[in-house]
Amino acid sequence: MRRRRGGNGHLLRWVMLGLVLAGGKVGVEWGSAGGAEVVAEAVAEPVTEEVTEAVVTEAGGESRHERGRRIYNYRCYFCHGYSGNARTLAASFMARPPRDFTATSPELLTREVMLEAIRDGRPGSAMAAFGTILTADEVALVADFVRQEFMIDGAVNTRYHIEANGWGNHERYAAAFPFALGEIALDQEEATLTSEQLVGKRLFMSACITCHDRSRVREPELVWESRPVSFPRGSYSHRDPVPVDAVASASIHALHDIPPSLPDLDPEARLGEKLFQGNCAFCHGADGTGKNWIGRFLEPPPRNLADPAFITAMSSERLEAAILEGIPGSSMPAWKGVLSETEVRAIGRYLLAAFSPGAPPGLQERDRLGSAASRN
């Protein structure tokens, strides 16, 4: 049976988010043979140990293998690569690179271990848990696709540079391929390059680098560097410098990085304000809405703490319990190992003071303007 070669879902937003959450250096491993056994209900439909392309097609005429391909191309390629070999930009920032499935034996990496890793993630690594995003059957579909496509068949999956994705006659850019594939370092002395390689490097730098980034360099430099990208906004002055932020002033999300002005907080709530803005605002936004840059990309999204319907239904005890114990199935971790009960109580008091009905004027108006900006 011929495999259908189609386009891929391309999530550029995961590039920035993945690097922010990874913190520059993280580890990711799939585990090894002999991991915990998966309970029977982890797979909605029985699937054999090694699934082939000849699996009976389902309603709509799409085989389980192709369904697994679509999930992989949408969720997994960013770290593990379209061809499963982990040759990705994200992998270059990880202390322990993602698994190269093309060099992995299906006997050594069992299906049960893979199901567990996809469903529950790997604590302390960059491998996220997809059990709250994918159904049990979808977890099985993507695991079986990886095993068949990369570990057994050694196939290359769907190539991105195809006519269906707007890349007709991609071979005409062959001069740039060595730089995109990392065969020639981007910082290699130009005096050592041939005329064809110089043409390829200029092509790579003018076009390919947008997605391939730096590919490979011999001497890595700073990953992030603060610099202005347009005319300074927000009354920035070199004579009175403030922390440089090259994007927030031009971003629809910056509106939600402005904390409410609360001049009359008592000492406990003031402590809570400091703790919230230093810890919780990373996901929930300084204004508590969860509509900041990071919050917009989390699945499921952070709680909108400024929602009057939510905050009026909450008690101090429920808020504190959520902070201490976390929220299962979400990105909300348990803070009981980081914050003391006194500090958690202060955060709860701050939330009620800042976001309950009757909060400082302007907060709701700021939220309304931010929603309008998001639609434009």
Image: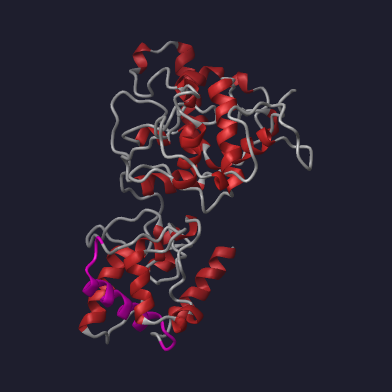
- Quick check: is 348 in the magenta stretch? yes
Q: Which color scheme did the rendering employ for the protein?
A: secondary structure
Q: Quadrant of the N terminus?
A: top right
- Looking at this view, name the residue that lies furthest to the right: 60
Residue 206 locus on image (x, y percent): 49, 31
How many numbered callouts? Answer: 0
Q: Quadrant of the C terminus?
A: bottom right
Q: Which residue is at the front of the view, 98 or 6?
A: 98
Q: Nearer the viewer, residue 121 or 303?
A: 121
Q: Can you tell which quarter of the image residue 282 is in?
A: bottom left
Which quadrant holds residue 363?
bottom left
> Residue 242: percent from the left, percent from the top?
25, 61
Q: Which residues are magenta?
A: 337-358
Q: What residue is at 26 percent from the left and 84 percent from the top?
A: 265
Q: Is residue 171 magenta?
A: no
Q: Nearer the viewer, residue 357 or 236?
A: 357
Res. 335 image quadrant: bottom left
Left or right for 4, reference 368: right
User: Residue 10, how many percent across, how many down?
Assistant: 58, 41
Residue 245 visible in the current orientation: yes
In the rendered image of this protein, does residue 57 appear above or below residue 253? Answer: above
The answer to whether residue 73 of the structure is visible from this angle is no
User: Magenta stretch: dominant SS?
Assistant: helix
